[in-house]
Image (spheres, coloured by chain):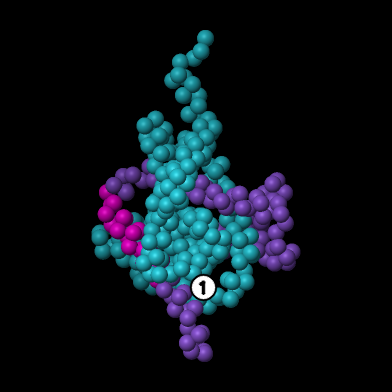
Chain colours: A purple, B cyan
Amino acid sequence: MIAALTQLLVMQLLGEVVAHWLALPVPGPVLGMLFLFVALVLRGGPDAELQATSGNLLQHLSLLFVPAGVGIMVHLHRVADEWLPLLLSLLISTAATLVVTALVMKLFMRAPATSGDTP
Amino acid sequence: MTPPINEIWVYLSASPLLGLTITLLAYQAAFWLYRRSGMNPLANPVLIAVTILVLFLTLTATSYETYFAGAQFVHFLLGPATVALAIPLYTQFRRVRSLLLPVLAGLVAGSLTAALSAIAVARLFGASLPTQLSLAPKSVTTPIAMGIAERIGGIPSLTAVLVIVTGILGAVGARYIFDAMQIRDPAIRGFAIGVAAHGIGTARAFQISEQAGAFAALAMGLNGALTALLLPPVLGWLG
């Protein structure tokens, strides 16, 4: 578990360093994910330990969002003042995003079958 | 002689142990309920855990800063967990590569819809400008979203909260929307939930299937990068 955790942290650190160095708009962990992905392709897959540790971490990914979510208590005032536009915006926009993304993907999955050279 | 209970409380509330422990306890309780409900999306564990913790902190008059001093250890793991998403991505890479065009098309359409519709609806119903701008990156994973909010004139800490609420809404609602649309492909379901509801959606997707989870992770990473690149100039053009 420690070896796997070390690998993850090293990749994150590399990501942080590169993101700051090149002033990229992408945060370090996302770059770290990319780096680990490249490493996995080069190595031909994760070892058993990395697989197990990552599986454990990702199985409870939701837990990791809890501390940030509790931050809502700091913004209760603004949320109370503007609750209607906030709620409608979040509801409508999240639903619209789900629908649009799924529809466009479905459209492009079918496209090559119906006509040969859809752009 | 044993000290009175309020003295123990004073000691405990100043230590990071309490914030950390109640976070784990609240999550255990929330996850137990989620399990008992047969993983019903309405019993979202983040939603339940956050509700328990906000109630507890309010009742004990504990500040968020004090709580976060302990909870930051959990928060920190978001970084390595994001890196770990490379593993399911690798496992599912064949399928991802075969769907490159639908993935990219869905990404661009979904990313723009997420940001622009959030601003439009908030404006329509009279939200203030800082609130509108804080809403714009709401579908993007927390660290990127906060960075974007800062750059475009939103309130980063408000954005962090809106991101979490968006994730919960997406994780709760996606199943009903996809079922109504008769979309069953785990690649599409996963990818759309990742674009709309970032890591919390991804967490939900992983509980459904590894393939949906991998596509959600991919969508979350791509959408974070694309929104960070696209949103500041797009808002510049729109004024």
Q: Name the chief secondary structure element in magenta.
A: helix
**Residue highlighted by disc 1:** B103
Q: Position of residue B132 (x, y in %)?
A: 34, 59
**Label 1 crowd (10 A; few <14 / some 14-19 / many >=20):** many
Residue B146 is one of the magenta-drawn residues? no
Question: Which residue lies most toward the top here?
Answer: B1
Task: Please identify the quarter of the rendering in which residue B30 is found.
Answer: top left
**Residue at left 58%, top 71%?**
B96
Q: Tag 1's secondary structure?
A: helix
The region drawn magenta spans: A81-101
- Amino acid carrying label 1: it is Val
Q: Is residue B134 left or right of residue B20?
A: left
Question: Which residue lies most toward the right here?
Answer: A43
Chain at numbered mark 1: B
Q: Position of residue B69 (x, y in %)?
A: 51, 37
Q: Position of residue B100 (x, y in %)?
A: 55, 75
**Residue at left 47%, top 42%?**
B32
**Residue at left 62%, top 71%?**
B94
Question: Which residue lies most toward the bottom here?
Answer: A116
